[in-house]
Amino acid sequence: MPGLNLAALILLVVTLTQIVSWVGKSVLQELAFSAYSRVLLSSPASKQRTLRKQVLADKAALSKTSSQDEFAKWAKLRRKLDKGLADLEAVNTQITSAKSSFSLRFNSLLWFITTGSQLFLVWWYRRQPVFYLPSGWAPGIVGWMLSFPSAPKGSVSSAAWAAVCKRVLLTAEEVVKDLLIPGPAAPAMVPPFAAQPGGAPAEKARPSATIHTIESENLD
């Protein structure tokens, strides 16, 4: 039973690692930061949206105001726009800094959950067999490789079991891709001689220039 629990635990960690690889760390990071910002950065995010709308409105009003005919109004709108841009830049800097800090913590956590956990399990249970193989199933060097590095002879080590699980998942990924994504169409076979409009095959062009050259050389 402990071996089965260890096999299931290693399979779970390897599967989780492959799922993260399939989905993509950047996608998971964006989803996590979106949820994080809604909870802990709701005020700066709301302020950013308000400032963006205000800046766009001020730009539109400024473009419709003549700097010569309505200079006082134009100058007032210009000062308001500059202040809005400065405030928006400050909010953007705050959110960007928060996102960078979050990305560092999120990537570290994701590494410990996936790759770090897998390395820890393989090292911590390096001497414990995941399960034993029937006698004679893996003779010689095959049995040694399955028990590498320190598991008892005739057993499957945690490192070998993790490698097998990863290989099976990668193979399953390739099978699913082949089923879902059609391969490139085979190129059409082109006949060596195209048919003439009347149905008769076209004659192969004769290298007349070469023949004339050879005859001239013979005459010389």
Image (cartoon, rainbow, N blue to C red):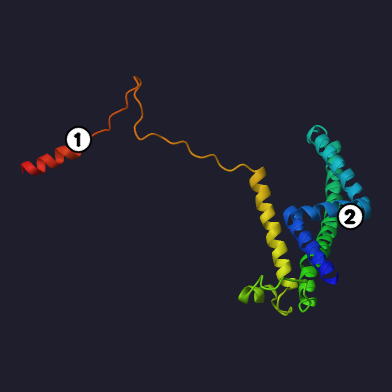
Identify which residue is drawn at 70% across, 66% down: 163
- Residue 125 place in picture, x, y as percent: 79, 76
Res 204 → quadrant: top left
Residue 81 in view: yes
Kind of residue indicated by mark 2:
Tyr
According to the image, label 2 marks what residue? 36
Q: Which quadrant of the rendered structure holds the N terminus?
A: bottom right
Residue 107 in view: no
**Label 2 SS:** helix
The residues tagged by marks 1 and 2 sit, at their Cα atoms, a distance apart of 79 Å
Q: Which quadrant of the rendered structure holds the C terminus?
A: top left
Disc nearest the viewer among 1 and 2: 1
- Residue 202 place in picture, x, y as percent: 31, 28
- Residue 8 place in picture, x, y as percent: 81, 64
Q: How many marks?
A: 2
Identify which residue is drawn at 73% across, 54% down: 22
Q: Residue furthest front?
A: 135
According to the image, label 1 marks what residue? 208
Q: Earlier in the sequence, mark 1 or mark 2?
A: 2
Closer-to-camera residue (138/196): 138
Closer-to-camera residue (160/54): 160
**Label 1 SS:** helix
